[in-house]
Amino acid sequence: MKNTYKAVQVTRPGLVETVEKELPEPGPGEVLIKVEACGICGADAGVIEGLEKGINYPRVPGHEVVGTLYKTAEPLPAWLKPGQRVGVGRLGGHCNVCEQCRLGHFNLCQNQPVTGSSRDGGYAEYMLARVTGLVAIPDDLSSVDAAPLLCAGIATFNALKKSCAEAGATVVIQGMGGLGHLALQYARKMGFRVIAVGRGDDIADEVMALGAHHYVDIRKDDAVEAIKALGGAQVILSTITESAAVSALLPALTPQGQLMVVGVGKEPLTASPGLMIGRELSVKGAITGTAIELEKALKFSLLADVRARIEQRPLAQAKEAYDRMRSGQATFRMVLTVNHQ
Ligand SMILES: [Zn+2]
Ligand SMILES: [Zn+2]
């Protein structure tokens, strides 16, 4: 049996290299996954470019991981079988002990590894993961298709589910990147009237094909005025990181409307108290989801035919694929594939 594996590690911020590592043994509550595919997410910049504080380098990035169960230290729970396809998202598995876990809020567990950040992720042939973080992948969903749904998919799917929008409501999706193009598909399939807000008319046809009822091009139109002319929005789901542009959309909300935030911008959001009070508006964050919520997102994606638009690259081209994502040239989402020799 092979006892080493290839991993793409960030040795220090900005330095990404392929290394040969010793195959680790899973500890209690852990499994070793043989990776088949791993999505590239904007949040990987935290590790690769050193934008995130407190990373212990070297670190293997990647938190949209799909593979098969290769080795376990303990008997598997009844819902898992040896060799089964599983996924791991950004949240690396809850502890079952902290107060949030005892409340059943597993996505808010305070003792949870962050995949590809506080522990090694899926830019690799193998990866260790906590059993509590594992997601069963439906047979009809390919590993490549499942990967981006484990972060970009669940983040937007759950934010819409946790919002106050009911069927028929008008929902604005701000930002037409990796998250936004999934958000607008989910919003359409959940039964909302969808207004997509993006930059440039070159993507207009594609945005409409993905399910938007209306497209607002911020290069041409004032987004708030355009949304107001369409009757305003009950919910704005913002996927972008430019906080000023997120805050600027608040006046487009109807009374008791809600701004859902999933883009992690560094600058503070700003809001006029008069507007918030006068219309009883709210701003809410949503952090991906629990393992079982991820399974629901995957099942919904199959049922409603929601998929990320993907470009694939082999693991050996991880850095080039990451750079392409960062440059904004990728067709919505990049996924690394692992070819085991
Ligand atoms: Zn992510
Ligand atoms: Zn916990």
Image (tube, rainbow, N blue to C red):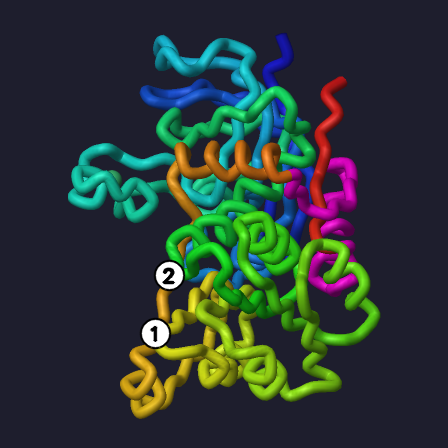
Indicate the position of residue 116 as horizontal and vertical percent values: 51, 44
Indicate the position of residue 153 as horizontal and vertical percent values: 56, 47
The kind of residue tagged 1 is Gln
The kind of residue tagged 2 is Cys
What number is the disc on residue 164? 2
Which residue in the protein does label 1 denote?
256
- For the C terminus, the image quarter is top right
- Residue at 30% over, 79% down: 280
Characterize the local packing of mark 1: few (<14), some (14-19) or many (20 or more) Cα atoms within 10 angstroms.
some
**Left or right of 105, for residue 214:** right
Query: CA–CA distance between discs 2 and 1?
Result: 9 Å
Q: Secondary structure at mark 1?
A: strand
Mark 2 near mark 1, Cβ–Cβ under 8 Å? yes
Whether residue 60 is visible: no
Q: 271 and 214: which one is in front?
A: 214
Q: Does 267 lie within the magenta span?
A: no
> Which region is colored magenta?
305-331
- Residue at 21% over, 45% down: 100
